[in-house]
Image (cartoon, rainbow, N blue to C red):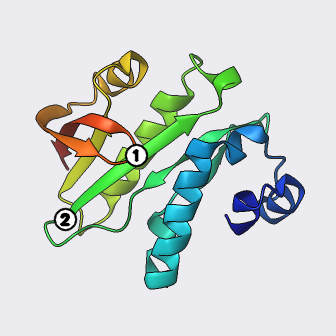
Amino acid sequence: MSALLKDDLDRASAVAGVALTEYFVTDKAKWVWQYRVNQLASNPGCAGWLTQIVVAEPEGAVVGYAGFHGPPDEAGMVELGYSVVPVHRRQGYARAMLTALVQRAVAEAGVRTVRVTISPDNAASLATISGFGFVKVGEQWDEEDGLELIFEIPV
């Protein structure tokens, strides 16, 4: 993440063990990396819950990044997030990421609720979560993303 924040794709790719693209150093992605670096600095134990590079198998294509916003909170809630590289969109990768994240959450004894927040005009993400049982539970204002709809499912 530190290499990505410095626009050093060669170093970041070497550390990740896969070839990363310019998508991973966009302003939006760099905001994610900075936030996660700060989280790790204050709580190294949360590393296993945070954003990771997503590689499609068996072809080995880097298709995006996904993870949780952190470990379960006091109420057992985890919030997930995912992003698909534009050239790989509309191929089922977002749904596959969402499936894997929900399965991971369900497998964790301390998780009781999975949350996802989505901009009301992000039709693709709204369509992606359909069929997973997410229910709209509210709205919030996010400093980075603006208005977001809050969806949750119990595990």
Percent of width and height locating residue 39: 46, 73
Task: Indicate whether 149 appears above or below 8.
Answer: above
Q: What residue type is labelled 2?
A: Gly
Residue appearing at x 80%, y 60% in the figure: 12
Q: Distance between the residues labelled 2 and 1?
A: 25 Å
Q: What residue sits right under mark 1 in the picture?
A: 144
- Residue 70: x and y in percent read 38, 65
The reply to whether residue 84 is in sight is yes
| Residue beneath the point at 33% across and 19% down | 121
Q: Compared to 83, does 74 lie above or below?
A: below
- Residue at x 51% of width, y 77% of height: 40
- Compared to 79, does 110 lie above or below? below
Total marks in image: 2
Q: What residue type is labelled 1?
A: Glu
In front: label 2 or label 1? 1
25 sits to left or right of 33: right
Helix, strand or loop for disc 1 = loop
**Screen quadrant of the N terminus:** bottom right
Instruction: Give percent across and percent down for residue 43.
Output: 43, 82
In this view, the residue in front, 44 or 2, is 2
Question: Mark 1 Cα within 10 Å, few/some/many (few <14, many 20+)?
Answer: few
List the residue tagged with mark 2.
76
Q: N-terminal of the two: label 2 or label 1?
A: 2
Among the 4 quarters of the image, the one containing residue 149: top left
Q: Where is 64 relative to 111, above or below?
A: above
- Res. 57 in view: no
Residue 124 is situated, as x and y percent measured from the top left of the image, at 42, 18
Would residue 142 appear left or right of 113 to someone viewing this image? Answer: right
